[in-house]
Image (cartoon, rainbow, N blue to C red):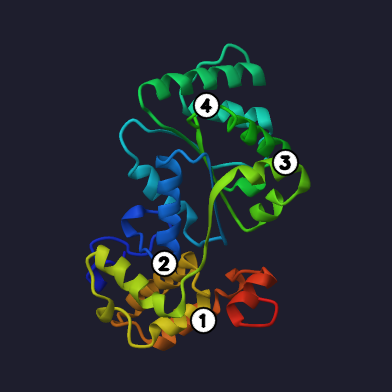
């Protein structure tokens, strides 16, 4: 709607997690490298956590889009309410496995046979479970049992667990210690730092065909950080709302006062986790 007014070919701040717009801060670059290495080196379990809106799903999509030919990927994005049998059914469906009966034994046997055939031809298989903090302990235990599918020298299935910080708390349960000990690589995706806001905004605008200084004035990045605490999703939302409001008033570049006005309506979206707030405010206990 406002793109041509600001010299953009396409929306620069869509909430859809598009790898095309991925800007690699240090924490996102390390997360991406952890995912690639865990999958390509066949390390078994990889754990990726981060606050809501930190960019985990964008990293996942970037990895999926760039995996070598011959890599098969099963992705479970909606984990709410899944029991262990539901999980196995979704994995089998994504891997296009026909199972004769809906029971755990049939699923495990069929999945194992497929993985062995793929290994014989040098092909890799990856299971990605997003929002894994919603899984029950029994479903997570089923994931651990899937990781037992291996030969003497190779992991047949690479498993990536991603989720919010609560996933780490869940994995710390005594009854899940066997799963916790199997995680070979883990990374926590942090929010952007204050000095990273402007490069992040400028990158997305450039990808969309525009120029940062033609849209945002000096000092806008400070307002964006204050309103978002560096959460990429909230940065995108504030940018989109500011662009729309400025377009409706035919203002370019966008006045700081207008950005600040739009930021006031987003305070209820900030992270509620008190430990996160301490870490980012420098209070004791961080």
The quadrant of the picture occupied by the C terminus is bottom right
Residue 16 visible at all: no
Q: CA distance from mark 1 to mark 3?
A: 37 Å
Q: Residue furthest top?
A: 100
* Pointer 1 residue: 226
Residue at disc 1, secondary structure? helix
Residue 46 visible at all: yes
- State which quadrant residue 86 falls in: top right
Query: Where is residue 129 shown, x and y percent of the image?
Result: 55, 42
Instruction: Please name which of the two marks, 4 or 1, marks the residue nearer to the observer.
Output: 4
Label 1 Cα crowd, 10 Å radius (few <14 / some 14-19 / many 20+): some
Residue at disc 3, secondary structure? helix
- State which quadrant residue 15 falls in: bottom left
Towards the viewer: 240 or 201: 201
Instruction: Please name which of the two marks, 1 or 3, marks the residue nearer to the observer.
Output: 3
Query: Where is residue 124 shown, x and y percent of the image?
Result: 41, 31
Label 3 Cα crowd, 10 Å radius (few <14 / some 14-19 / many 20+): some
Q: CA distance from mark 4 to mark 1?
A: 52 Å
């Amino acid at each position: 709607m406002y793109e041509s007014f600001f010299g953009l070919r396409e929306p620069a701040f869509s909430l859809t997690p598009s790898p095309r717009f991925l800007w690699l801060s240090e924490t996102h670059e390390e997360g991406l490298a952890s995912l690639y290495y865990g999958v390509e080196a066949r390390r078994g379990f990889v754990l990726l956590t981060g606050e809501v809106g930190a960019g985990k799903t964008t990293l996942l999509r970037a990895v999926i889009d760039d995996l070598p030919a011959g890599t098969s990927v099963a992705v479970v994005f909606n984990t709410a309410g899944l029991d262990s049998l539901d999980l196995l059914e979704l994995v089998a469906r994504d891997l296009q496995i026909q199972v004769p009966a809906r029971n755990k034994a049939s699923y495990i046997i069929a999945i194992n046979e497929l993985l062995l055939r793929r290994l014989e031809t040098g092909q890799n298989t990856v299971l990605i479970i997003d929002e894994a903090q919603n899984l029950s302990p029994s479903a997570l235990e089923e994931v651990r049992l899937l990781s037992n599918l291996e030969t003497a020298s190779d992991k047949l299935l690479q498993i990536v667990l991603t989720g919010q910080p609560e996933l780490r708390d869940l994995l710390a349960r005594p009854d899940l210690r066997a799963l916790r000990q199997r995680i070979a690589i883990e990374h926590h995706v942090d929010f952007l730092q204050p000095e990273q806001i402007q490069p992040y905004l400028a990158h997305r605008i450039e990808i969309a065909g525009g120029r940062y200084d033609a849209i945002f004035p000096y000092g806008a990045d400070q307002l964006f950080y204050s309103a978002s605490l560096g959460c990429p999703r909230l940065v995108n939302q504030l940018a989109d709302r500011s662009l729309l409001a400025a377009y409706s008033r035919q203002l370019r570049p966008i006045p700081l006062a207008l950005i600040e006005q739009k930021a006031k309506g987003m305070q209820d979206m900030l992270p509620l986790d008190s430990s996160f707030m301490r870490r980012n405010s420098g209070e004791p206990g961080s």
